[in-house]
Image: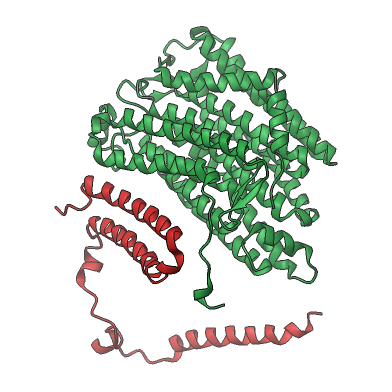
Amino acid sequence: MTPTDIPAPSIAYGPLWPMIAVFLAAAIGVLVEAFVPARRRRPVHLVVALAGLTGGLVAVALVARNHHHPTLIAERAVAVDGPTLFIQGTLLLLGIAAVLLLGERSLDSTGGTFVAAAAVVPGSRGERQLTASSTMQTEVFPLAMFALGGMLLFPASNNLLLMFVALEILSLPLYLLAGLARRRRLLSQEAAVKYFLLGAFSSAFFLYGIAMLYGYAGSVDLGAIFTATGTVGSNDTLLYLGIALLSVGLLFKIGAAPFQNWTPDVYQGSPTPVTALMASGTKVAAFGALLRVFYVAFGPVRWDWRPLMWGVAILTMGVGAVLAITQTDVKRMLAYSSIAHAGFILTGVVALNRSGLSGSLFYLLAYGFSTLGAFAIVTLVRDADGEATHLSQWRGLGRRSPALAGIFALFLLAFAGIPLTSGFTSKFAVFSAAISSGATGLVVVGLIASAVAAFFYVRVIVLMFFEAPAPDGPTIAVPSVLTYGAIALAFAVTVVLGVIPGPLFTLADKAALFVR
Amino acid sequence: MLRPYIPILFLGILGAALAVVSVLGGGFIGPKRYNRAKLDAYECGIEPTEQAVSAARFPVKFYLTAMLFIVFDIEIIFLYPWAVAFGRLGLFGLVEMVAFLATVFVAYAYVWRRGGLDWN
C-alpha cells in the first residue's frame, strides 16, 4: 500500500463528548490563567471546571441513552460500552467533589492548601512570606482538569498506544500537583520527584510491554491481540513478556504490591485535595484500564496470568493491611488502606466473569467516594502548622467535634466493610464473584486481610471517641460550602450504597460487558 | 533442543573476550606519550569552551526557549503532511487541524501573557 492510499479516518464525535467537555474546560482554564486578573481567577476557574465536569456528566448520560449497542469508534481506538460509561460517570462525579476540595481557600488562615508560587526554595525567607500570602497557584485547576481528562480516556482506550497517551495525560499533571502543597514544602516536593521518577519508570515498562505485544500480534489493538491469542503457532514468549510488562505499568498506577512503595510517601506529601483526587480518580481510571486490557485482550490466556494475579492480590491485601497497623500518620494510614483495597478489587478482577466485572465497577465507585470523603475530613483537622496528621493529635476528636468525627468514623467503617455502609456491599460483591469463579482460597485471604484491616480502622475510632483530647490538640477548621459539599456527597454515596445498593448493582450489572 | 544455540553462545563469548582484551590490552601495553595535539578533540570536534567546565550553570531561561521550540517544532511536523494531503483529507483534516492549532495557541497565549517571551 502506498502512502497515498491511506484513507481519511472517520470519527463519530458524539460519544467523545464526555472527554471533549473536560479537555475543553481544561483549555479554557489555561486561557483564564492567561487573561483573567490574578485576584479573580479562582472563582472563574471553579465555574469553568465545574461546568466542564457537569457537561461531561450530561454527555455520559446522553451517550448512555442513545447508544444501546456498544461500539468502537475513532478507528477502533475508543470503546464506547458499559464499563467505559460507568467509569466515566464515576470519574466525573469524583472529579466534581475533588474540584470542590481544590477550590477551598478558607481553611488555611491565609488562602487555601496550595502554594502561592511553586518555584520557591523551601526554607528560604521568600517561602515564609509566601506561606502567609493569600494567593495560590491557580494553575491547579487546569492541571486537575487535564488529569481528569486523561483519566476519562484511560479506561476507554481500546488501543494500547492511545492507552499510553492517556496514561501520560493523567500522570504528568499529577506529578506537578503533588509538589504544590502550601505547608511542608520539602515533603511535597519530595513526593512530586518520587512520583515522577517512579511513574516514569512504570510508563517505560508499560511502553515496553506494548512493544512486545505488537511484536506478538502485529497490532496494538486489543481486539487484534485477542484474535492473535486464539491462533496456534505464534510466539508466546512475546505474549507473556508483554502481559508481564504491561501489568507492571498498570499495577503501579493502582498501587498494588510489589509496586506500592510510592503510595504512602506521595499520598502524605501531596496537598490533601490532590491526594483525594489521586486516591479516588487515579485508582478508578487505572482499574478501568486494567479490567479492559485483561478482560478484552488477555481473556483466552487467563490460565497463564491468573495465578500471577492471585499472587499479586494476596500480596497487596497482606502488605496493605499489615503495614497500615504500624502507621502513625493519618494520611499514610489511608495510603496503606488504599493499597489493601486495591488488593480487594483485584479479587474481583481475578474472578474474570460478569459478576466480577460488575462487582469491581461497584467497588470502584463506592471506594472512590469513601476515600475522597476521608481525605476531605483530613483537610479540616488543623493546628498552627497546617494539617495535624499525626494520629496522636486526633485523640479525643470525637468529643470536640462529634459530627465530623462521626462522619470520619463512618468512612472508616465503610473501609472495614461493616454492614449498612457501601464498603460491605462492595466487598460482598467482589468476594461472591470470586467464589463463583472458584477462587475461594483468595477470598479466605481477603477476609483475613479485612479482619486485620478492621483492627486499625476501629483503633482510630477508639482513639477519636474514647480517649481524652490533648490540651494543645488541633482545631477543626470551619470550611466554606465547597468542602461541605464534597463531604456531603461522599457521605451520601457511602450511606445510600450501604442501605439501598440495588439500583446501582443493577446499573453496574447492565454495564458489565466489554465490547471487543 | 538448545544445541543450535551453542555456536551463538561461543560467538558471544568470543566477541566479549575480544572487546575486553582490546580495551584492557591497549591500556597495559600501549605507549603513553601525550602531547597537546593528542589531547585535543579528534578531527571533527570543536574546542570545548571554558564555560561548560568552570561555570557549569547556564541561565534557566533557555529551558523555556527550548520548550517553546519543541511546541512549534511538533506543530510544523503535523502541518507539512497535512498541507500535502489537504485535498484528500478534506473537511475532516481541516477540523482536526484547527482543533490541534487551537490547543497549541492556547499554550502559546499562556506563555505570552505570563511573561515567558520577555528576556530580562
Q: Is residue A126 left or right of residue A184?
A: left
Spot occupied by residue B7 in the image (x, y as percentages of width and height): 71, 87
Spot occupied by residue A88 in the image (x, y as percentages of width and height): 57, 38
> Farthest residue toward the left?
B120
Q: Nearer the viewer, residue A101 or A5?
A: A5
Query: How many numbered dots are placed on residues in this image?
Result: 0
Q: From the viewer's perspective, is residue A272 above or below residue B27?
A: above
Tell me, yes or no, if residue A180 can be seen here: no
Residue at x 67% of width, y 25% of height:
A423
Residue at x 62% of width, y 31% of height:
A365
Spot occupied by residue A207 in the image (x, y as percentages of width and height): 56, 60
Q: Quadrant of the N terminus of chain A?
A: bottom right
Q: Nearer the viewer, residue A500 or A384?
A: A500
- Colour in which chain B is drawn: red
Q: From the viewer's perspective, is residue A114 above or below residue A420?
A: below
Spot occupied by residue A452 in the image (x, y as percentages of width and height): 71, 28
- Colour in which chain A is drawn: green
Tell me, yes or no, if residue A374 can be seen here: yes
Q: Nearer the viewer, residue A472 or A505?
A: A505
